[in-house]
Image (cartoon, helix red, strand yellow):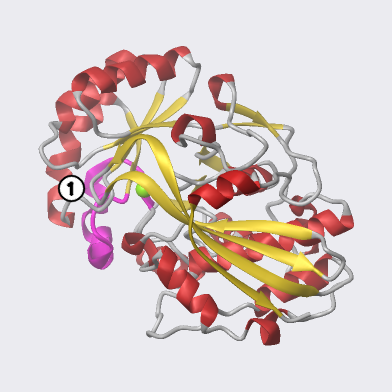
Amino acid sequence: MRIVELQAYVIQLPLRRKIQHASASRTDSQNVLVCCRLADGTTGWGEGVPRDYVTGESAQGAMQQLKETPLAQQLDLECHDWPNVIALCERFHPNQQAPDPRNHRSNALRCAVELSILDAFGRLFGEPISAAIKHLQPQCTIAEARKFIRYSTTITADDVAKERRSAIKMRLYGFQQCKVKVGVNGANDPERVKRLRFWLGSKMDIRLDANEAWSVDKVSEKIEPLLPMRISCLEQPCPHEELNSIPLFKAHWKVPVMLDESLTSLEDAKLATKLGACDLFNIRLSKCGGFVNSIRIAEYAHLNDIGIQLGCHPGETGILSAAGRHWATHIRGIRYLEGSYDRHLLQELPTNEDITFGYGGRAPALHRPGIGVTLDKRVLQRMKIAENRWVWG
Ligand SMILES: [Mg+2]
């Protein structure tokens, strides 16, 4: 079976509330959706969430990259089984106009195209995309199937009343882990985190994400007053440009450090490990170039005794939520898990299925063929702001 057509959409998704952190503030999300059609008419959907401050991508730029990529030449390959499909995904190399030393400037696009291919062939084979994991070469060493997983929650910077409402709601909802965004201009983080610890309760695992807000020599003075609130992890305290200096200061921070903006590819993972710049990686499917590449990064982390979080981008639709669910229910050793916020974050779901997590952040493994969600075409028509189609079969 061959791919005969690719369709790509840029969609604009209104969020239910403003998401604010140290690097950005947004009320909507522009995502790239890709539909892959096989010769027998089977279709699959993939998604990427390009963020310029993470991988230097934009939704319109991803569309342009697709236009400049010889798609038929790369994707017209006969596939009979998962090893063929994985090889096909690995042939996809979007055109690059600029040098890309971190190998990440098309990661969201790669993720969208790869997921659409995995989804289409998963539907054709009658198997979920997680079935592809056992066919990876070299073999995946961290595969482990689980029936249920638990997501953590996030509190973004907001006014006191809204933060209190969020914290109390999340505690009552039974979450066990909560990430708090810090480092936003004008916010008094020691007071905020103290209040949040009180509202979230003593049992909640609280970690912080500074989104590159602090310069590396200032992290000690910023984190010191927050430590009494029992912080389990500090995510991306300083800008990526200061990565080389982190090892000089890190021992004084007295809290495990997770990299996010500095961790977008296997090349990033290797550099951070060589430098000794972190204790954990925040892997996100879109940021890290897709389902398979994210597994490779997780395996590298495991081999080097580095913990992992599977994160997400606010504004992901059910496609990435479901793909993340397949990933998280089949990869072991995930310290923190984010995603499947769909109904809580999006004003309208473009997928027919709602796979938002349930009470306590609990969610089951998905077993339907492919990624396991379908698109509501009417919602897609309303949300789309650009569209392109390539047919070769
Ligand atoms: Mg982050």
Can residue 267 be seen by looking at this rendering?
no
Judge by depth and name the residue closer to the eye, 212 or 227: 212
User: Could you tell me residue 122's position as x and y percent?
Assistant: 80, 56
Judge by depth and name the residue closer to the eye, 242 or 186: 186
Q: Residue at x 36, y 68 (%)?
A: 56
In which image quadrant can residue 391 be found?
A: bottom right
| In the displayed structure image, the side of residue 191 where residue 325 appears, left or right | right
Q: Quadrant of the N terminus?
A: bottom right
| Element marked by disc 1 | helix
User: Could you tell me residue 161's position as x and y percent?
Assistant: 23, 17
Residue type for callout 1: Val
User: Could you tell me residue 11's position as x and y percent?
Assistant: 48, 54
How many neighbours does mark 1 have within 10 angstroms: few (below 14), some (14-19), or many (20 or more)? some
Judge by depth and name the residue closer to the eye, 295 or 160: 160
Q: Which residue corresponds to mark 1? A: 219
Can residue 71 be seen by looking at this rendering?
yes
Q: Residue at x 20, y 50 (%)?
A: 213
Number of labelled discs? 1
Q: Quadrant of the C terminus?
A: bottom right
User: Could you tell me residue 256's position as x and y percent?
Assistant: 36, 44
In which image quadrant can residue 228 be found?
A: top left
Q: Which residues are magenta?
A: 236-259
